[in-house]
Amino acid sequence: MPTSRWRTQSDFDREEPTTRIELPSRQQGSRSSMSPASEPSPPSTESMESLVKPRWQTGSNNGNGERAPLIGRLWRSITSLGRGGNYSHDYYAAPSNDNDDSGDPSNAPKARRRRGLTYGGLLHWFKWFLYRLPVFALMFFGAIHLIVVVYGKKSLFWDNDRPDELLSDWATDVEGLAHYATDATRDVLPIPCHSHNDYWRRVPLFDALHWGCTSVEADVWLYDNKDVLFVGHSAASLTPARTFRSLYVDPLVEMLDKMNPDTDFGTTKGHGIFDEDPDQTLVLLVDFKTNGRDLFPIVEEQLEPLREKGYLSHWDGEDFVPGAITVVGTGNTPFDLIIENHTYRDVFFDAPLDEMYEPAPSNPDNNAAAAPPSHKTTRGRGKSGTGAFDADSFNYTNSYYASVSMFADIGLPWTGGLTSGSLETIRGQIRGAKRRGLKARYWETPAWPTSLRNHIWKVLIDEGAEMLNVDDLQAVASLDWEHVGHGWIDG
């Protein structure tokens, strides 16, 4: 039985030579037992280290000794998912051939990689896209919604309410009032909108005409000076320069004189304010703020420049004669003083619309008792001097508008729209106004949110209201008025 023994140097000498690495002796000057001629040349230390170093230490794919670019490594990582590869990008594989002693990592065998799209790769990308499709859709439509909102609300961030530079030169030495008046309504489409509190605007009267409104409002006040009617929303806002004559009567006379010239080519008569529609009248709604009986004769006197030139709509005792300007009294205007003259009237009344409800003709009980509940309002619109008169006393011979507060009479549309009962009330009131030859007008309509405001505008016009009471003139002018009743509100 063979006995174990320690291997001696001679045993190693009889074995075949193998690749060996000569390490330095611990003692200086030690010699190897092998002859230098019989042992192979050892690989360099740098080559050995390169076999185990990660790629980011040894160099890039082409072995140039530099680190691969970050974008390239990321791209290879992404594309490997599509090819279904599962290999490391960080380390070289060590040589599997023992006879390859070059130590060059570029000669190391590499795993065979599948190239091109495979079924698994297609399935992977399909799932990746399918899982993320809802997110992409929400992001896309969210971005579209944000753009629409920002564009629709751009007036909150910058002022685009005055695209026409002509307004900025009004009543200045460069472009005086006379010059502006001749061009004020060129290419302007008249629309049935009433400029509520018109005297508050930057350029009273002309701002409303610029956007095409066919009705403007002036609140007048009478104080100790019996010859002057001041214009303003409250007593605190009154100034000596802002008067009924200076803001409305005199500018209208000057504009109409320009529209109806007497030249060598002939004389123009009956031309209204709007060049696009010369027959369109402009309603001047005068809100009597102080005592109506004291105000009424002064208002009639202040209108004389328009009256003497034939610019006022009037009742001649038999018929209504339309003119370029139609004056309507509201607020504390006394109805009994308007109808006092039986042969001539050029100031008409703003009748109470809430008293004019009429049921549909198909209803056999065609009487006022069939009207739905209505919140009567006595807030100074069409009530002064009407105590002895019923609803049938108001007609086209003495009145022009029939108005009511929508907030007080119909109520606020809390549900985002009008209820069936509210719609029936509106239809009955408009029906009664039309039978009397009057134009229905609702004031105190919702102004916000804009979607509700536009919805109410559309409902009122579709149901037959002939005048919209508005504060945002640009918004109402932006509607598609050439296709009213056929999706006329854009969007």
Image (tube, rainbow, N blue to C red):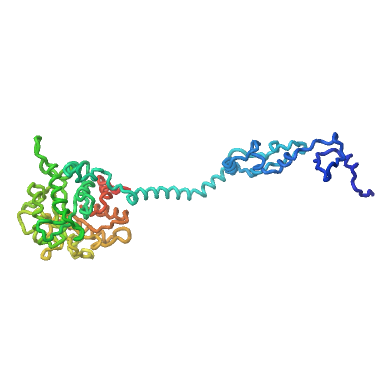
Q: Is residue 424 left or right of residue 126?
A: left
Give the residue displayed 31% in from the left and 48% down from the top. Answer: 159
Which residue is at the front of the view, 149 or 111? 149
Which residue is at the front of the view, 143 or 84? 143
Q: Residue furthest front?
A: 28
Q: State the count of labels.
A: 0
Q: Is residue 119 visible?
A: no
Q: Is residue 319 left or right of residue 234?
A: left
Give the residue displayed 29% in from the left and 59% down from the top. Answer: 418
* Picture coordinates of residue 424, whole percent (x, y): 24, 59
Which residue is at the front of the view, 319 or 338? 338
Q: Residue furthest right?
A: 1
Q: Is residue 52 visible?
A: yes
* Picture coordinates of residue 84, whole percent (x, y): 61, 43
* Picture coordinates of residue 384, whole percent (x, y): 13, 63
Which residue is at the front of the view, 121 or 259? 259
Q: Residue furthest top?
A: 37
Q: Is residue 69 left or right of residue 442?
A: right
* Picture coordinates of residue 193, whole percent (x, y): 22, 51
